[in-house]
Amino acid sequence: MFRMISRLSACVLVPLTVFAVLAGGSTANAQATPTIALVPANNPPPVPSGMKVTCLTGPDSLQSSPTCPVIQYGGNTTWAFSFIDNRVSYGIVTYDAANNVVKNVTRDGARYVYKMTVDPNAKTVGVWGQANAKVDVAWSDLPTAAPEIVQVPANAPPPVPGGLKVTCLKGPNTLESSPTCPVIKYKGHTTWAFSFIDNRIAYGVVTYDASNNVLANNTQNGARYVYKITVDPNAQTVTIWGQADAKVTVPWSALP
């Protein structure tokens, strides 16, 4: 897989006790954008106590809509419920893919949602209700699902940036190439841990969108030749393991 294999095979593998955290490099303005979907009003996920589904056809009507706008972001879905006591507030409730509640917050200022809009400049979602009252929800307040690690063919990467190469090994103490590479799937994007052509002890951590456009390209020193990637839900980090079990740790918040 890489031309330096014969030279590297003669090297002694020694422990590399370096712990690196994602920082630096070049990053595009690549935060994923929430999308608004219309879903059946009569088929919501479990509604928290004290709340109800109230979706209207417009700002000046009390006619119920057959659909409700919801926010889809980072693998989660967020609803704007009303309260049973009809207060002028929303229950902004986020669910994961299994319909478990991830977050439940009360936002005052509007009720009875009829539409939602996305503002890419302000990075907010507007939740519009009765009489066109509106509550803005920051994208950063929307929870995202945990990153997922998947194995993909090593011989079919997206376009590799200049100076980088695909080097995925079968373990920490072997130079045998693996037929697959671990990659990070997060917010609809895919992140690869490439090696450098000059075999420096660093990764090129490169994130692609669904069309294989580069969203971020960061050099992370401290490890090379990835063989596995792990997720820590408590610390909210992803760790990229390489030769001699050296590792680079990336916060979820740093992944586009």
Image: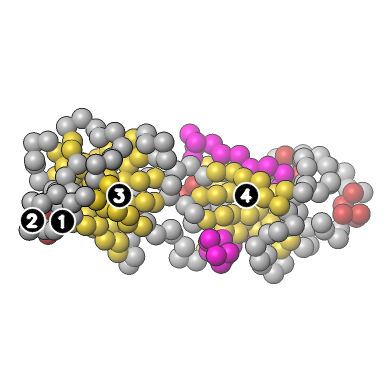
Q: Disc 3 on helix, strand or loop? A: strand
User: Which residue is labeled 2 in the image?
Assistant: 61
Determine the CA span between mark 1 and mark 4.
43 Å
Q: What residue is at 28 percent from the left and 40 percent from the top?
A: 44
Q: Disc 4 on helix, strand or loop? A: strand
Residue 225 among magenta residues: yes
Front-most of 151 and 227?
A: 151
User: Which residue is labeled 3 in the image?
Assistant: 39
User: Which residue is labeled 1 in the image?
Assistant: 57
Q: Residues within 10 Å of mark 3 (few under 14, many from 20)?
A: few
Q: Do the residues under discs 2 and 3 have CB atoms within 8 angstroms?
A: no
Q: What residue is at 55 percent from the left and 43 percent from the top?
A: 148
Determine the CA span between mark 3 and mark 1.
14 Å
User: Which residue is labeled 4 in the image?
Assistant: 183
- Residue type pointed to by label 4: Val
Q: Do the residues under discs 2 and 4 have CB atoms within 8 angstroms?
A: no
Front-most of 189 and 245?
A: 189
- Residue type pointed to by label 3: Val
Q: Quadrant of residue 106?
A: top left
Reading the chain from its start, which is encountered first: label 2 or label 3?
3
